[in-house]
Image (cartoon, grey):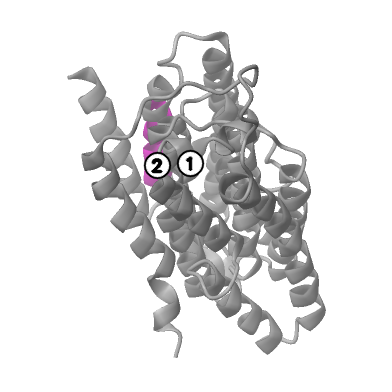
Amino acid sequence: MSTAMIFVGLILSTILATASNSWLLAWLCLELNTLSILPFISKTKHPRAIEAATKYFLTQATASCLLLLAGTSNAWLTGTWDMTQMSNKLTSTTMLIALTMKMGTVPTHFWLPEVLQGSTLLTALLISTWQKIAPMSLLFIMSNNIQPTFALTLGLLSTTFGGWGGMNQTQLRKMMAYSSIANMGWTVITLTHEPKASMINIFTYIILTTPTFLLMALTSTKTLQNMTTMWSTSPLATTTMALLLLSTAGLPPLTGFLPKLIIMNELVTQNLTPLATMTMMTSLLTLSFYLRTTYLTTLLNPPSSATSATKWRQKMTKNKTMILLPTATTSTFMMPALIP
């Protein structure tokens, strides 16, 4: 019963934050959202889980303080808490830093890999997907008042550090965290020029990340070593996982390529071709560690000797497989057909 109440609070806080037009109400909803996710992070009785919950709380509390500071300063300057009335450059920049800190973008991204590594796979799924909806909605509302140069700088740094950070990871949760940082860079980089493209990108990421984390949870896969024996649980799930990883990396003609194509087209249209070129080059970093993971999943056979260490896992039931795999496959191939 208590878990259901906390989950309802998590959903309601996000909905109210996205529907609010006042910074004060948005701040209250984001605080409720933070308090609702903390029990899920610390539910596992392990020091890493407590550490992850503490880091998440401190980071979100700092971001909330910055958000309240920016909202209060803007209300003092303009006489209103309205989100669309942020003409002051200092308050809009402070608000952008606060909201990007909540989502995990450079330079306030250091908390995300550690928090995901200390959480369960399902909790990591919530942090990587659902917890980004409310801050992203607020950024969409104030996108007209964001300084373009600052947003472009944050976006390029996020794609670069997200790609470099994920290349040396053997833990899948940390790898997905750095992938999230890189994806948030793609979202922020076009926020001031084409906010709708940013929303398409973040929701495409959510659609692709959700079945990826669910497949990891169902197959008890947490490291790259586990990926090499994932085929023994379900060959069909292994194939779908490979497609999801390649789609998240933005490999054409899969779903993840569509938002990147739209963002590149917008940057070129705005005469930002050098920036578009650098962003595409940084996306190759993300593609490299996704290709490595896909290679380990589908093309590499584990050692078959009796002394090799193989992780024991429970077989996936047929019902779970039949429910999840069509959803994952549909999300992988759904959107390229929409390209005119």
- 225 versus 130 height, above or below: above
Question: Residue 222, how many percent across, how many down?
Answer: 54, 31
Q: Which of the two residues, 57 or 126, is positioned nearer the viewer here?
A: 126
Say few, some or many: other residues with alpha carbon within 10 Å of mark 2 (under 14 / 14 to 19 / 20 or more): some
Question: Label 2 is placed on what type of residue?
Answer: Ser
Q: Position of residue 119 (x, y in %)?
A: 50, 25
Residue type pointed to by label 1: Trp
Q: Are marks 1 and 2 in contact (CB under 8 Å)?
A: yes
The secondary structure making up most of the magenta span is helix
Magenta span includes 27: yes
Residue at 53%, 62% in the rendered image: 247
x, y percent for residue 182: 66, 54
Foreground residue among 304 and 154: 304
Q: Does dot 2 land on a helix, a strand or a loop?
A: loop
- The residue positioned 64% from the left and 45% from the top of the image is 300
**Element under label 1?**
helix
Residue range (magenta)? 25-35
The residue labelled by disc 2 is 234
Total numbered labels placed on residues in the image? 2
Q: Residue at x 47, y 53 (%)?
A: 239
Circle on res. 231: 1
Q: Residue furthest left?
A: 1
Q: Residues within 10 Å of mark 1 (few under 14, many from 20)?
A: some
Q: Does residue 284 appear left or right of residue 44 in this picture? A: right
Res 231 seen here? yes
Q: CA distance from mark 1 to mark 2?
A: 5 Å
Residue 96 left/right relative to 14: right
Q: Is residue 167 left or right of residue 309?
A: right
Quarter the C terminus occupies: bottom left
Split into 4 quadrants, where in the image is the N terminus? top left
Q: Nearer the viewer, residue 224 or 210?
A: 224
